[in-house]
Amino acid sequence: PRRRVRGGVAAARRVHVRSCRIVVRATFDPFGTFVPSFERGSTMRKIAGTLAILVVFAHALAQAPAYFVHADMVRGAQHAQGAVCVANAVFHPGEWVIFRAVVYDAATGEELSHDAIAERGLTATVMVEGLEPIAMFYPPKEEGTPEGMYFFRGPWPIPADFAMGQYVWNIEVRDADGNVAAFAPIGQTVGLSAITILAGQ
């Protein structure tokens, strides 16, 4: 049976019940019908805040880089006019620049080698200002080769008529899932670590 409310005034009586810090407001309509409504207490606000933090954290993880790249460049042995296989930034036309890169798993910090590179479909590419992209390669395993000698390599023979000057460069690593990581030398925009081409000796 409907419960009569004196005077027939809507919302004449309110009942407040607190359970688990959730405020339940119970309103009776003019016919005595129970109409509940809910409000969040402090605990619910804390839960909502925690969930919001978790969502932001998950989004940050999704945006975090999958890989870290360490790279440099050295002078190749072909037509060398200086020390070979040491970090270098000054070259001459006719010489070979060898770009080198090591890729690390960002989550574990471990260097990736043959099996992991093949499994993930990793590729590495060198971009030099004014040039077509240079595809890098990862050498196959060879008996007797020290582990430290395995890394991505990208050779670039400098044309004899290549213009003198400084050129910025970077390396991009990409896997089969579309994850991308990039390396750019520090300070090359002000001449540090950029490729400098000078006239031959």
Image: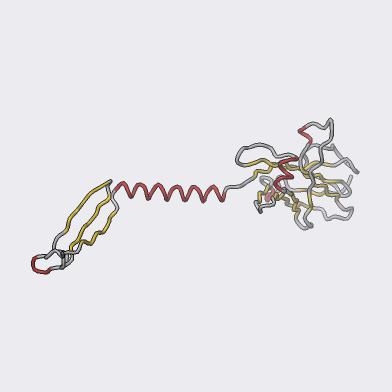
- Relative side of 78 to 190, left or right: right
The residue depicted at 61 percent of the width and 47 percent of the height is 65
Q: Quadrant of the N terminus?
A: bottom left
Q: Nearer the viewer, residue 31 or 60?
A: 31
The residue depicted at 83 percent of the width and 41 percent of the height is 75
- Return the x and y of residue 121 as percentages of the image width and height: 72, 48
- Return the x and y of residue 34 as percentages of the image width and height: 20, 61
Q: Nearer the viewer, residue 21 or 137?
A: 21
Residue that extends furthest to the front in the rendered view of this protein: 1
The residue depicted at 56 percent of the width and 51 percent of the height is 63
- Return the x and y of residue 51 as percentages of the image width and height: 41, 49
- Return the x and y of residue 116 as percentages of the image width and height: 71, 41
Image vertical order of residue 11 relative to residue 42, above or below: below
- Relative side of 122 to 155, left or right: left
Scheme by which the image is coloured: secondary structure
Count of numbered circles in the view:
0
- Relative side of 141 to 48, left or right: right
Q: Nearer the viewer, residue 12 or 201?
A: 12
Residue that extends furthest to the left in the rendered view of this protein: 7
Residue that extends furthest to the bottom in the rendered view of this protein: 8
Image vertical order of residue 163 relative to residue 87, above or below: below
Q: Nearer the viewer, residue 184 or 64?
A: 64
Image vertical order of residue 76 relative to residue 174, above or below: above
The residue depicted at 75 percent of the width and 51 percent of the height is 125
Q: Quadrant of the C terminus?
A: top right
The quadrant holding residue 67 is top right
